[in-house]
Image (spheres, rainbow, N blue to C red):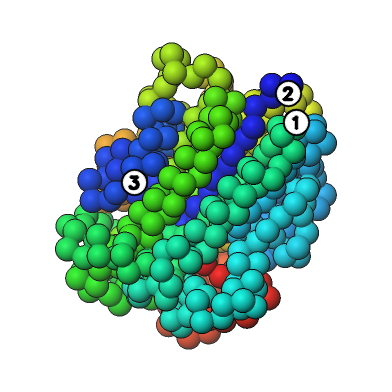
Amino acid sequence: MNHRPNIVLITTDQQRFDAIHAAGNTSIFTPHLNWLCDTGIRFSRAYSDCPLCMPARATIMTGLPAYRHGSVGNDQSEPMRARPTLASYLTAAGYETRAQGKMHFEPMRNKFGFETMELSHDYYRQRQQTQPARCGAQHGQGQNEMEPVLGSVSSNETLTRWVVDRSIDFLDTRDPERPFFLWSSISKPHPPFDPSPEFWEIYRDMPMPEVVKGDWSQDFDMIPVGFRQPTAHLNSAHRFSREQLIRIRRAYYACITEIDTTLGRLFTALRERGLLKNTLILFTSDHGEMLGDHGLGGKSLFLEPSAHVPLLVRPPGEWDTDPRRGTVDHRLTCLADLLPTCLNAAGITATPPPEASGINLLDSSAGRSAVIGQCGKTFAVIEERWKYTCTTLGHGELLFDVLADPLEKNNLAARHPEQCSRMRSLLIEELRAAGSPQIAADGSLIQHPEPSFEDIRRWTAWPGFHSNTSTTDLLH
């Protein structure tokens, strides 16, 4: 009988850290994520060091921050070609490994260490072959657009339901004498914000949190253009009225409740098959969503709605009497911590690469003083109290006291130049040590010419057009 724990990693796509009821959001329904909070550990300061799909997933797989694994944009999976991955470590150790749902790897069918894989693309491929009239996302809304739209199929026929149903099928068809690693990767609440009609009804009149504005974002045009670039590229969130943003948020929350309800099926399946006692469950997201806060939409920024992600861990074993059950851990954590946490739980003693910086989340003595981030031409240093973020597309600096100002309303850069200088130096030192091409010969960050916002909008706008017959793993 094998006693090594099973591991279930559940990821959503583009879920903000604050979109969980048990974390304090009384405008959303998330009973099953609440259950993870109540029976596990909620990490309240978890960040994506590159809040974008492909780099974040490469970090989960390699245990390296993006500025060290080298992919800081949605363009490649090279970091996983040259290094062992979470999946390959576990497969080599005898685990049965399965990837289910959105992986966003390149090339799409490369398993990067998984034994078996079923992608989101397979849902669309199968539905087109068997039930083309009952296939999700037939409304025409783009994969980046924020405008809400009702889902085109019932909740029992969605991609979310398919990912969970196929995950349950894996539980029933796996080798029962081997431990397993299952990554269930759900594509929502990434746009389009298209909840099934029954979930939209739940939120039709639900009061929503107010859209956040700061002293630096009262006027959209005063925000440095480098911080506005993702909005120009993806969704033009600055155009929406307050009332429209409230409706957008309702649709976004409805997508999350639909995910949560469907996850109830997976947790029930684990319990009914007697697997909960010996299964490590981890839940997180690759990055968040601005949702119109500060006039911005999408991701790629190191502001809280974009870079701060949920992170819930429910350990295996005799956990019912552990004093950490149902607690909140305020250490700085990041997606790079998933790999060492899983390997430690599996008893794998493989030596990680020297540039790895992840910690075992279940070791309360482990910690870090800062999370360093890069996403394209945007950078950040996040500490317990201070957050510094800058852009080199033109110039712009923001400094927040996130303990006193968690909504990031007050830019303190002009008032605390010494903090900006200290944190900028820390950033440059870390990037230089990683061999980053972003460091100039004089030791400064390389600056790039500042385009106009209108030029970005005209020439790079991409609402995410993809048909149901697309041969990519990018449909949500």
Q: Is mark 1 on a helix, strand or loop?
A: loop
Q: Which residue is drawn at 65% across and 47% down?
A: 170
User: Residue 18's x, y, as percent?
Assistant: 34, 46
Q: Which residue carries the number 1 mark? A: 177
Q: Can residue 372 be seen in this view?
A: no
Between marks 2 and 1, how big is the CA–CA gap? Answer: 6 Å
- Say above or below: 281 vs 439: above
Q: Is residue 357 above or below residue 143?
A: above
| Pick the front one: 208 or 319 | 319
Considering only order in the chain, which callout, 3 or 1, is on the residue closer to the N terminus? 3
* Residue located beneath label 3 in the image: 30
Tags 1 and 3 touching, CB below 8 Å: no
In front: label 2 or label 3: 2
For the image, the number of numbered tags is: 3
Dot 3: element: loop
User: Would you place residue 423 above or below residue 208 in this image?
Assistant: above
Q: Which amino acid does label 2 sit on?
A: Asn
Q: Which amino acid does label 3 sit on?
A: Thr
As drawn, the residue found furthest toward the bottom would be 458
Q: Can residue 197 be seen in this view?
A: yes
Instruction: Give the residue displayed 31% in from the left and 62% down from the top.
Output: 199
Using the rendered view, name the quadrant where residue 365 is placed.
top right
* Residue positioned 23% across, 51% down in the render: 27
Q: Which of marks 2 and 1 is nearer the N terminus?
A: 2
Q: Is residue 370 left or right of 435 when viewed as pictured?
A: left
The location of residue 248, given as percent across then percent down, is 30, 68
